[in-house]
Image (cartoon, grey):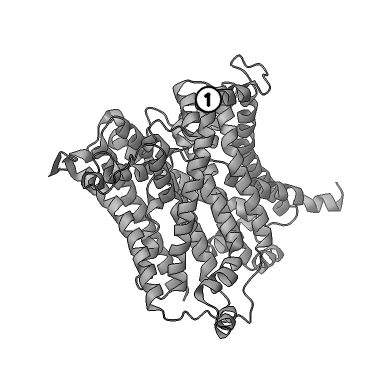
Amino acid sequence: MNSSIRRWFSRFRFWQFVVLVAVLLAFTVILVFPLFSLFSKAFLNNAGEFAGFDNYSKYFSTPSLSASIKNTLDIALWSTLFSGVLGFLYAFALARTRIRWKTFFKYTAMIPIFIPTVVHALGLVYMFGRQGVLTRAGLFPFELYGRLGIIISEAIFTFPQAFLMFFVALEFADGRLYEAADSMGASPLEKLTRITLPEIKYTIINAFFVCFTLAFTDFGAPKVIGGSFNVLATDIYKQVAGQFNFNMGAVVGTLLLIPALASFTVDRLVSSKNSGTISAKATKLMIAKSIKRDAFFFCLCSLVTAFFLFLIAMLFVGGLSEHYPYNLSLTLKNFLFNRSAGGVDSYFNSLKMAFLSAAFGTAFVFVYAYMMEKINGFGALRKYGKLLSVLPLALPGMVIGISFIFFFNDRGNPLNFIYGTIAILVVSNILHYFSVPFFTASGCLKKLDKEYESVASSMNVPQWKTFLRVSVPLSLPAILEIFMYLFVNAMVTVSAVVFLYNAKFKIAAVAIIHMEEAGNFGQAAAMSLLILAINVLVRILYEAAIKIIKEKRL
């Protein structure tokens, strides 16, 4: 072995290579192989023989099934329009006006994130259902179940996503442009259309596709409030869980990928173009006083906040009532839960699943990001790794769930032993929510001075020590944020795990669906409140931990 090969296989380089290959192999197994199984299944018949596009022809020639595509497009477009416009106005109020209570409004806008989408629909039932509070008061003379209910529920679901994207885009602006516009006598509308909107045009495009994809692929709300209004997400559930027609389920799964892939492509294109930064010569935007403007936006934010708080209040009413709406006597019996629907065990199962998803997911994501950002060489492997890291953005939860069925339920698969266990739920959650934590970890590691690794290498300090003693402590805020993100999302997820849970290991979000199906609305509301409580607690603990870390570093 010559000297160059000997140097390549030095102690540090060899273990870097081993760890890099290990994480890439793990990611390939849980991402690429299941997707291959999904696509191959769509082109096979029930006998396992190649059928070409026969399954697709059958799907589109069945009126009740093909109508689902039109229905899904319809609700996705309308809910995206509502949440996008409202999210922009809400973000504008917090970033570009002088209204009070901005912090309060910002946190209440996050309420939908802390509960499953099935709970959004459940809250709407309590408000606008046939026996809902507002319906009984004569304030909602419409039929909630079906198209209207799904649109409202999906708008609630996607509103926080739109708000956060617009808020980040609007928070920073070059005040010089607005000063010049004022000196030229431009009206507020002219400044909005000629300066503000062009500045955030890429955010508008990105927000549209993100919200559209989320609404297009959501399962929870249509399942609870959809009635006979079929959408693709409920179709795939009926085909796989109801009729055991896995080939047709694979067809619907590939159709669900279309808007997600389009959103992913647009996001990549927009990200490459939207790389400009605020000029060093920029001045802070000074927000002028305007009583009328601030009054309008304060009322807008107050109405949105009141709606979200009222939705949560209705969950309290349902969860603490003897039998809503016929007997409103205060009771705690709904928190005892029937074992047939999963019982209280389903809640603790969700806690266990969420904690394991957050713990193992945080470790895997951070090590993966470290291998992508902090080691030298292995260019081809690292490019492949970065490609894999962004692909989960284009995968709806239901596609992950059904592809995991095809891959891990195969008796010939050596990993078949994890099927039907908590392990497959944890793996699906890590894959489903991988990309956002990866970008967080990657961005944090890029900010760390490369001299740490250079000095450690010159002193023959093993890289794992540098990783544990330098990179991890300096990245602790990002690590805690990743843990919190994975935990909260694992607690509220439905779409992927609804195909993968074991009947003996039911989780809370799925239990809510079964409680609603059985007419146990009080227990469903009670379980929803428990999920909300733990997610809010985790968020509070995260905020407290970040505050302590910042104070110690000061």
Residue at image point 65% right, 47% down: 19
State which quadrant residue 414 falls in.
Answer: top right
Give amino acid for label 1: Pro
Q: Residue furthest top?
A: 47
Q: Residue at x 67, y 66 (%)?
A: 450
State the residue position of label 1: 63
Q: Is residue 425 left or right of residue 434?
A: left
Q: Secondary structure at mark 1?
A: helix
Evaluate whether residue 500 shows in this view.
Answer: no
Image point (46%, 70%), residue name? 95
Query: Which residue is nearer to you in this view: 363 or 402?
Result: 402
The residue carrying pointer 1 sits among few (fewer than 14), some (14 to 19) or many (20 or more) residues within 10 Å by Cα, namely few
Residue 61 horizontal/vertical position (percent): 58, 23
Residue 223 coordinates in the image, percent (x, y) = 40, 35
Where does the image place residue 338, in percent across and percent down from the top left? 25, 31
Residue 15 at least partly seen: yes
Q: Closest to the observer: 143 or 79?
A: 143
Q: Determine the image quadrant of residue 40.
A: top right
Count up the numbered dots: 1
> Looking at the picture, does residue 315 appear above or below residue 506?
below
Residue that protrudes farthest toward the right in the picture: 2
Residue 424's x, y, as percent?
Answer: 49, 34
Q: Is residue 368 left or right of residue 74?
A: right
Task: Decide which of 316, 549 is in the foreground and name it.
Answer: 316
Left/right placement of residue 486 relative to residue 23 reads: left
Residue in the image at 57% along x and 85% along y:
183
